Image (spheres, rainbow, N blue to C red):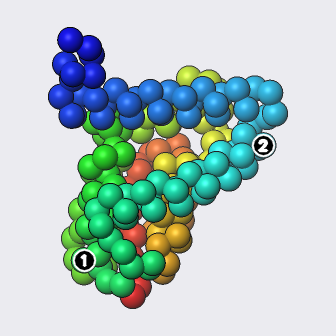
């Protein structure tokens, strides 16, 4: 029996997400060493923006959502829940809730990106790509939003806590 047949769906997802994030981290590391942290941040955000449009389209297709733009909060909650059910690994160690209409609250307990950036010695200059990815989903979906706090650098570094609220406008 091959490994693919031995693994549960969740074990397979975890393995693939970890491999993908390892690739992402290795790519960032090599860019920062070769080109410097400022260029690595710029290229990382460009790659995230390109990727996020494709992945959210694939999620929409997989769940059968045919509208071009998200029309209401219920549709948005569905696509976020479905996207994270596939794309979030347990090691990512964050949670999110929808505490009230048109709001998402997130808490990143321990950030894999923060830990990786510390290991390669660039945490002081790293611009958060994790939350940028979610914002790119929203941009592609045509959802107007406000994020608080405003994020550029790692919130665990600048505020010692990574949590906040996305407020959506339909």
| Residue 41 in view (yes/no) | yes
Contact check, label 2 and label 1, Cβ < 8 Å: no
Q: Secondary structure at mark 1?
A: helix
Real-space Cα separation, disc 2 to disc 1, in angstroms? 38 Å
Task: State which mark lies toward you, 2 or 1.
Answer: 1
The front one of 152 and 21 is 21
Mark 2 or mark 1, which has the lower sequence index? 2
Extreme residue toward the top, this view: 1
- Residue, disc 2: 39
Residue 60: numbered disc: none
CA neighbours of label 2 inside 10 A, class few (<14), some (14 to 19), many (20+): some
Query: Is residue 15 positioned above or below 58 on the image?
Result: above
- Rendered location of residue 162, percent (x, y): 41, 51
Q: How many marks?
A: 2
Query: Is residue 31 positioned above or below 67 on the image?
Result: above
- Residue, disc 1: 74
Query: Is residue 157 positioned above or below 105 on the image?
Result: above
CA neighbours of label 1 inside 10 A, class few (<14), some (14 to 19), many (20+): few
Q: Quadrant location of residue 119?
A: top right
The answer to whether 71 appears left or right of 33 in the picture is left
Q: Please tell me which residue is depicted at 28% across the width and 62% down the height of the picture.
A: 63
Q: Secondary structure at mark 2?
A: helix
Q: Please tell me which residue is depicted at 49% across the width and 49% down the height of the picture.
A: 130
Q: Quadrant location of residue 31?
A: top right
- Rendered location of residue 10, percent (x, y): 21, 34
């Amino acid at each position: 029996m091959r490994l693919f047949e031995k693994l549960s769906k969740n074990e397979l997802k975890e393995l693939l997400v970890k491999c993908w994030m390892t690739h992402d981290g290795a790519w960032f590391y090599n860019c920062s060493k070769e080109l410097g942290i400022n260029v690595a941040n710029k290229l990382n955000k460009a790659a995230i923006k390109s990727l996020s449009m494709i992945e959210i389209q694939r999620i929409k297709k997989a769940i059968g959502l045919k509208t071009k733009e998200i029309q209401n909060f219920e549709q948005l909650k569905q696509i976020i829940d479905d996207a994270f059910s596939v794309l979030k690994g347990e090691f990512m160690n964050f949670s999110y809730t929808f505490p009230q209409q048109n709001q998402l609250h997130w808490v990143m307990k321990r950030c894999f990106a923060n830990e990786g950036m510390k290991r390669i010695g660039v945490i002081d200059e790293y611009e958060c790509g994790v939350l940028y990815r979610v914002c790119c989903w929203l941009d592609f979906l045509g959802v107007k939003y406000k994020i608080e706090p405003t994020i550029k650098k790692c919130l665990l570094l600048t505020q010692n806590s990574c949590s906040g609220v996305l407020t959506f406008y339909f």
